[in-house]
Every structure is written in structure tokens, then in C-alpha cells.
Image (tube, grey):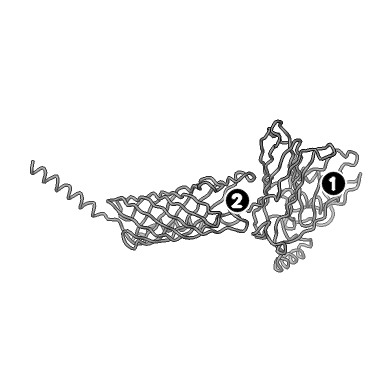
Amino acid sequence: MGRLAVAFVTALAIGASTAQARPASTGWYAEGGLGAVTFLPGADADPGPGLDMRFGRDLFSWLSFGVSVAASSHEATPPPPPVGEWFQLYRGSAHLRLGVMIGRVAAFVEGNAGAAMISSNVLRRQVEPGERFSLLFQAGGGFEYQLENRHYAIGLGVDAFLLPQFESIQALASRLYLRYTY
Amino acid sequence: MRRPLLPLALLVVATGASGGCMNDPVYIPGPMNLEAGVDDGTGALSEATAQLQLPINLETEADAAKRANRAEQLGIAVPYVKLGDLEISVEWTVRNLDLENEGTARVQMNGANENFAYDPSILTLVPDDEDIEAPPFDGDVPIHIPPGGSFSGVFREDAVREAAIDLEQITRANVNPFTAMLTFSKNAEYIQPLTPPVAGQQQQPVGDPIPREAFAQLVRIDLRFRPDRHMVLEYTVRVRDVRGIVNTMLMNAPAEELATFAPATYGG
């Protein structure tokens, strides 16, 4: 029985050391994500597909910064007319991310500040003529899973953002992403 | 060392996404709704009309010089706002305000370019029968709308382009409005001017053809609304500003920044 216990403990120790041999990379990284952007009540627009790309650097294992660009496409739902018209929302920002890693899973919170551009004035109750740009404030968080290859991770993130110049439109941007760290 | 392709792919996608910003539409809501279909005081049902002049910037000196140069080369007048400079469509919604009875409405689209306007309501093309109305550029189809219901439609970009060419045919080439409206001309490369119409005589080609690059685009959209019950029409003009001549402030633009057009009404 005693031998069996020693063997079991030894096996656990070997397993643990094997996990430590595959740490996540830190340094410069790039992320590409696909997801959806859903406006909160107050905007005359349906949810739409979104694309999100990020580049940055890990300063420490728990702190990173970078820039992100995102685009989403939506069907406008203002009082008709018009009917069935679509618009695109482009967002660019700088972000800061705080995270903690437990085993292969990391949890993080992040904050962004930047600018957004809308492709048309179809949301006439939110976007004045001649107005195409707004400041952007964004905050959110998510989870990340480290793959076997230490350069790659996949994750799920959800951010809320605010566009003050567009009658303070608010929306949730969710994304599934793949992250490559050099 | 193997270079990962992911960052490069993301950069390519980002570049493509930013290219999608070009040629985006702007929406110009009608300044007021058209309400009609009630007794106009003479026992007849009221009609409503609207004219929306597009907010087009003043022509720059460089553009004017370029246009004059091109006109000299072609030997024909070239308009400031040409076909292809703007792609216009008109989206509209009719609401039946009668909550008990179905009604029928007609929505007619006409308009003007910078030189000529077309208003079928003032034309008498068949002197022997004044009941035959001159044709509109588009629309005038009876639409049945249930009590309290609504119906949305659109005069599409290709219909407005066709209308612009029809107007050129009618005003610069002496083509009969019925002929112009009933022929499919939106892809026409030129218009052959004809001799003025004279009763009992065949019109003959005269002068050089007008090339497509000298066709004018509409700069004013006219709507005529004729319901048989109390209804309201709301509309929005959608413009894709291909050449970048529409003022970004749209209807809020200062008047001194906008071009003023004084088109002559055909047949008026």
C-alpha cells in the first residue's frame, strides 16, 4: 500500500512538472477575433457580425497593452423609411489588459479608449448630418485557454462600449478569438 | 525561423475593411411628410407634392475649368452634375390613417436636373383627349393599403438613372415623353437629337449625338402623392456621392456653400 502511494505521488509530481514545461509565451502578440456587436436599447440597429483585431505587447505575464481595430455591420431599424438599410461601424482604440493565469486558463479585464466611425447617417436619431466620428470608451473582460503550443491561445471576450458623440449609443461586443504570442 | 502568417492576414483584412468606407450612402429625410386624401374644399380629394433639392456644393474653379475644357472637346454642353456623379434612390412609406377602410394610393416620382425640370401634371401630350395624363418618370402604380396599415417602397438607383436619361431625351433630344418613358435607356451610350415634333410629320435625326458623359443627373427629386383616403407619405432620399460633391451637412448646410439651380420646366 505504501509503495502504491509513493508511486501515485510520484506520478502526480511528474504530471505537474510536465504542465510547467509548456508555459505560455509572453511578449509581442496578435489577436484575431470574430463575434457579434449588439446595441443596447436606444439605438435603431440590429445586432450584427463583428471582426476584431489586436496587436500589442505583454509587459508582464499579468499586464499587457496594445491597439485594436474592429468593424461590425448592422441593419438599421429607424422608423421607416428607410427600410432594410445596413451600415458599418469601425472602431479603433488603445487598450490595457490585466490578467491572471490559473493552469491553462486565464481570466482578464480590459479597458479601451479610442475613436469610432460610422459609415452613414442612417441612424438619423443618433447621428447628425456631417457627423461620422465619435470618441470610444470600452471596458470588458473574458477568458483565455492556452493551447499545447505555447504561442497560441483561444479566448472569449465581451466588452461594453459607449459612443458619446452618437447620442451615447451603447453596445456589447463579444468575440471568439485566436491569439498568437511571439 | 518560421514567420507566422496570422498577423499578416489580420493586416490584410483590416485594410480591406477600411476600404469598405468608400462610397457610403447618406440619407436625406424629406423635410416634411405629405398628407393628402382629404376633401380639398372643392369636393375633390387633395393631393400632395414635394420637391427636394439635393445639397450640392458650389462648383470649384478647377471643376469648372475641367468641365469647360471637356465641353470644348466634345462640342456640347457638359453639366456640372453628371450621370454617375451621384447614385440616388428614394425610399418611401405610405401610412393609411383611415382605421376602418382600405385605401389606394399612388406615389409618382419626377424631378429636375440642373437645366430642366419635368412635371407631367402641367403637360397635355394628347390635345384631343385631356384625360390622358403625361407619364411620370416612375411610380404611379395603385397600391392597396389596409386600414391603419402601411406600405414601403423604393425608387431604386437604376430607376433614377433611367429617369435622368429620360429627362435628357425629352428636353435635349425632342423625344416624346411617352417614348422616353417606355424605352429602356439606362445603359444608353448616347442620345440622338431629333427635329422638333410637328403634327403629321416624322421626326428626323438632327445634329451630333449627345455622349453619355454629357448626360445630366437629377439634382432635384419631385414626388406626387395621390391617395383616395386620408394617408401620409414619408420619404428619404438616399445618395451615394460618387464624386464627393454633396455637402456633408446635408440640409443643414449654409446656403452660401450650395449650388443654386434654376431649371426650366419642360412644356411650362
Q: How many marks?
A: 2
- Name the foreground residue: B184 vs B265: B265
B250 sits to left or right of A9: right
Residue at which label 2 appears:
A125
Q: Is residue B43 left or right of residue A97?
A: right
Among all residues in the image, which is located at the extreme front? B41
Characterize the local packing of mark 2: few (<14), some (14-19) or many (20 or more) Cα atoms within 10 angstroms: some
Side of B97 relative to B176 (left or right): left
Badge 1 amino acid = Ile
Q: Residues within 10 Å of mark 1 (few under 14, many from 20)?
A: few
| Disc number for residue B104 | none
- Residue B78 image position (x, y, % from top left): 76, 60
User: What residue is shown at x 83% (from left), y 37% (from top)?
Assistant: B44
Residue B99, image x, y percentages: 69, 33
Q: Amino acid at mark 2?
A: Arg
Label 1 chain ID: B
| Point 52% across, 46% down: residue | A41
In which quarter of the view is residue B6 placed? Answer: bottom left
**Quarter location, residue A165:** bottom right
The image quadrant where one finds the N terminus of chain B is bottom left
**Residue B143 appearing in the image:** yes
Q: Secondary structure at mark 1?
A: helix
Q: Is residue A140 above or below residue A59?
A: above
Q: Is residue A109 above or below residue B150?
A: below
Left or right of B240? Residue B119 is right
The residue that disc 1 covers is: B122
The local secondary structure at tag 2 comes to loop
